[in-house]
Amino acid sequence: MARKWWLLTGLAALALAIPALAKETEPAPAAKAPTVSGVTVDAPKKDNPLVDPASEFVRQRLPQSQNSEQYPRFRDDICVKVVGLPDEYGAFIARRIVEIAAQAHAPMAKASDCKANVNVIFTSRPQALANDIARRKDILLGFYWNAANLKRLATFRRPVQAWYVTRVRDDTGKSWLEIHDPTSFLDPPHGRAGSRLSNGMSAEVVHSLIIADANKVAGEKIEAVADYVAVLALARWQRLDRCSSMPTILNLMADGCDPDAKPEAATPQDLALLTGLYSVQARESGSQQRATIASAIRKATAAEHQ
């Protein structure tokens, strides 16, 4: 987009080794190296060549279903609703979510009066809103064990946070929501034994809730916020407070990222991850799904460097 919109309001040095000249006489004692008191030099961390960055990114950032150990994605048609912004901005963000979902080949609702299962809310009081949801409709915050766990789950810590409702489904069509349910042990999800490739289960995202602190995203470009929210909404994520070495729009609001590591649009790796996620066989094992998603990311990275 040519026109830029703004949301709401802005080793130390390397030592040179010099070979000593050979002498017939005994060499003089080496001069004592100068030191600087109180200075600590940290060598830059090197990537482990035995660890595939794409696989590690998927493993660390996409949590698996606690019941099926697969990677959930939307199975139902996606319907987006954005509130808390002027209509022009809200429509832009909703449209961008739809565009990225289409690129990922995610299922999309066609009717304009569809029931929203991706709800994006901008508010200047995000903690109050999260508390209200925890009190009146805790199912939207996803799975939790007890009241203390729910309180931690509902604590708003980031400029933008997401909560997901997920479910698992067996090969007979029966499904279980992965939510707080004290009676769930009476009829736990169970798959089909006997195969390392599939257990007869599949994992799905049922609902994405995105809450943005309007005060903290005020200085960001609307295009960057829209892409951030879109990528966040279309998959279940975790550990978004940490800067990633993988080029991703999710670094936009992560801690410890250099400015040049914060893209202002969804990256080829983001789009490849989502496309890979929505292309996996629903009943494959989680390890097979991860391999498919990571392969898509590697291909996107290789294409960038051609």
Image: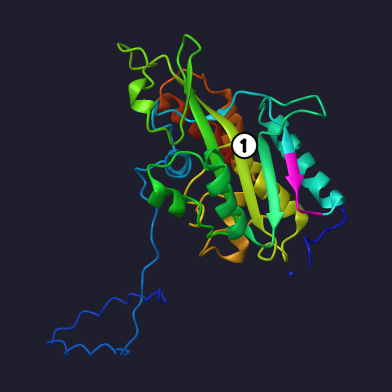
**Quarter of image, res 220:** bottom right
- Indicate the secondary structure of the residue bearing disc 1: helix
Residue drawn at 83 percent across, 58 percent down: 5
Q: Residue at x 65, y 49 (%)?
A: 228
* Residue at screen point 33% across, 17% down: 196
* Residue 279 makes an appearance in the image: yes
Q: Name the residue under label 1.
A: 234
The boundaries of the magenta stretch are 81-85
- In the foreground, 245 or 147: 147
Which quadrant is home to the C terminus? top right
Tell me if residue 260 is in the magenta stretch.
Answer: no
Image-quadrant location for residue 205: top right
Q: Name the spot of residue 96 as percent of width and height, x first.
A: 76, 42
Task: Name, please, the residue furthest toward the left.
Answer: 26
Residue at coordinates 36% horizontally, 49% vertically from top-left?
48
Front position in the image: 14 or 102: 102
With 264 as the anchor, is 270 left or right in this view? left
Q: Residue 91: horizontal and vertical position, in percent?
A: 82, 44
In front of the other: 97 or 261: 97
In reply to whether residue 82 is colored magenta, the answer given is: yes
| Percent position of residue 183, x then y | 37, 28
Q: Residues within 10 Å of mark 1 (few under 14, many from 20)?
A: many
**Is the residue 13 above or below the residue 113 in the image?**
below
- Residue 159 seen in the figure: no
Q: Is residue 115 left or right of residue 75?
A: right
What secondary structure characterizes most of the magenta part? strand
Q: Which residue is most to the top?
A: 172
